Amino acid sequence: MRHRWLSKLAILLLAVSMVGVACDRGDDEGNGGNGGNGAQQAGGDLLTEVIDRGTLRCGVNNTVPGFGFDPGEGDIDGFDIDFCRAFAAAILGDAEAIELVPVDADNRFIALQNGDYDVLVRNTTWTASRDGTEGVFFAHPNFYDGQAMMVREGEFSSIDEMDDASICVTSGTTTELNLADYFQQRDLAFTPVTFAENPELQRAFIRGRCDGWTSDRSQLAGIRSVWPDNEGGPESLAILDEVMSKEPLAPGVLDSEVELGDAINAVTNGLILAEELGVTSDNVGQLAGDPGGSGPIAGLLGAPVLDPASGESAPLDFGLGLEQDFMVGAISAVGNYGEIFDRHLGPNTALGLERGINALWTDGGIQYAYPLR
Amino acid sequence: MASSARSAKPPLWRDVRVLRIAGQVAFVLVVVLVLREMYLNATFQLDQRGRSLSYDFLDSRAGFGVKEHFISYSPNRTFWRAFWVAVTNALVVTGVGIVLATILGILLGIARLSPNWLLRKLAQGYVEIIRNIPALVQIIFWYTAVILAIPRLEQSISLFGLGYISNRGAAIPTLKGGADFGAWGLFLFAGLVTAFFVRRWRTRVFDDTGQPHYRFLWSSGTFVAIAIAGYIILGDPFTVEIPEVGLRSLVGGIEVSPEFAGVLVGLVVYTTAFIGEIVRGSILAVSKGQKEAGEALGLRPSQQLRFVVLPQAMRIALPSITNQYLNFWKNTSLGFFIGYPEIINITRTMTNQAGHELEIFSLLVLIYLGVSLGLSLIMNILNRGVALRGATG
């Protein structure tokens, strides 16, 4: 009796596994369009898929104030989130057609490769190995960041004074490497205390476990802005001036999805160009109808441009697979680059960041967009 | 007719021997198919991403710093070295931790059965509270609420000027070897060997004459005498290094980091509760007659426990305690949350610097598996040593 039961079970198991195998194979084939196995497909079908699906899924941060932060009710907001909105407005014509997928620093690339989301906008540093090994196609940096050191006000005025200091750092970022390089170059001893998450690190820092806290300047500014008042508030902390590393933060997609990548690159550049050309969320509607003979603005907003050869006016088509006026929707939804910056990071926000090198090239910064023509 | 019908072969699908074999074959087939599918899936996915498994990156420069290491390390060493730093860090916590947890666990188990009501209830309360709270919660509690609450470096607690405790770490004096330190080590070794023979001699005297043996006093006295003699002959083979409070860290001595202490205390407290219960159960499993026999011989209760009950109880407890050792080893991974540079912590950094998630993950699996199996092997050998001879035959 028992054996018959066993053999039946075994056969059942076998059958189930066959079904499983079949399903798996089916998945493998169907997955191509899902971004996961996109490498085998001709690039660009993720853009089509996003348009067909009607929503854009962005891999975002929900723990960094200003960039991507969830204040508790589940509606994540921030600088990066506005870029996601701009992408959705440009690609789908609806800035709210987004799905925000919070991802950790260390699983963001795996999740991207798995097709868990379409666009990475999660204060991610563009590096060569992420370009190569991780297979990410990065768009124009939306924020030029740099690693900095935060200390208790008055304890240090420069990293050079920090010999033999304990430095708190979160694991899973490029930060640990820059920290070691920076201190080694200056022949300073240091003790890295590496935490998994910011809350544990913050508690340790408050208790005086570390002399310094190193991370990207933007992140430190965010953390400092919400420093608990019973621990002295933001004024009890200082972010030192030294720049320990270059951290160009850029949105990205999978290498294989170059058409989607081109699209978000065009939007990122377009937002910067809009600021340069003085196109804002207020005047974009009016300028789209009447660019007033300005070629660059017409190109940006997809307004008809006079073709001197034929003498006819027609909107330019960049061949990006987007509507010709894709930037109008994006700019109406979130404003130009300067507006987004001021809303989430600027001097009037809790973060209080100056534009610094993120100012337009015309203002002495390095934000310089390609022309849309 | 009836008998020949019964002796006729049943159809195949009702033949118990055939079914038995078929069941086995089917099972093996399922296992093989599942494994094959997993392998194919992995290679297929890798191909899709244009990647292949390669462990070459382990030989390139790690570049990141590691706070504490029991083997030498600097950011200029390789990823491979960083990985072994992580493994030794986890092993050291495990080694120290299981010794402490075993000693405390035995005491706890005995206390659970104590005739003293207060002690018994305290022990029971300890077990009930500790074993019902997740290890991670306890580790974070010990680290943030207890260890980080110790005064800061500037207000370090002084241990009579010999050691210091602060929330940057604790330090105690250490021996710093001079030129003749190795030679002194030989003296110590000679002392140990002599002490061993002295102990044997005292035991023989006791067995032969019944005179008190005092073998502990004799042997330890011999050892200390030889050690001191060696020290005088060699002339200061070592100096004692007393730690000092530096500007931003404790300097000198043997240092214990807050993170190490957090993992160690958290896991020892946790594991002690489980070992205590195992010991209690094992003591109860020793037949009552054994204790009564000890009583009949005129042994004091402490002697009954030490010479009659505990040796038999430990024999019963050993396999279950092995499980706790394995748990301890695996639980060191929780140290990640409080910044102890154990295997998860370091491999996470490695993954972020070098990519190669799959390769690093395979290393993780292999090292946890390997050390666990190694621990099991040692404990099984130990178990075989204490098991009742011929108990099965």
Image (cartoon, helix red, strand yellow):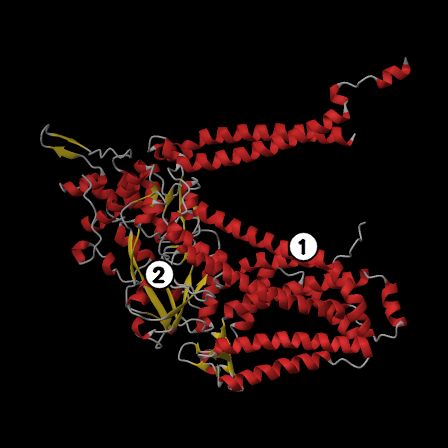
The quarter holding residue B31 reads: top right
The answer to whether residue A158 is visible is no
User: Vertical placement of B15 versus A368: above or below?
Assistant: above
Q: Quadrant of the C terminus of chain A?
A: top left
User: Residue at left 38%, top 65%?
Assistant: A225
* Same-chain check, marks 2 and 1: yes
Q: Residue B76 bears which disc, if any?
A: 2
The quarter holding residue B117 reads: bottom right
- The chain ID associated with circle 1 is B
Q: Quadrant of the N terminus of chain A?
A: top right
Left of A32 or right of it: where is B96?
Answer: right
Q: Residue A183 bears which disc, if any?
A: none
Q: Which residue is mark 1?
A: B380
- Give the percent coordinates (x, y) of residue A354: 27, 62
Badge 1 crowding class, 10 Å Cα cut-off, few under 14, some 14 to 19, many 20 or more, is some
What amino acid type is highlighted by mark number 2?
Asn
Left of B18 or right of it: where is A313?
Answer: left
User: Residue at left 75%, top 30%?
Assistant: A3
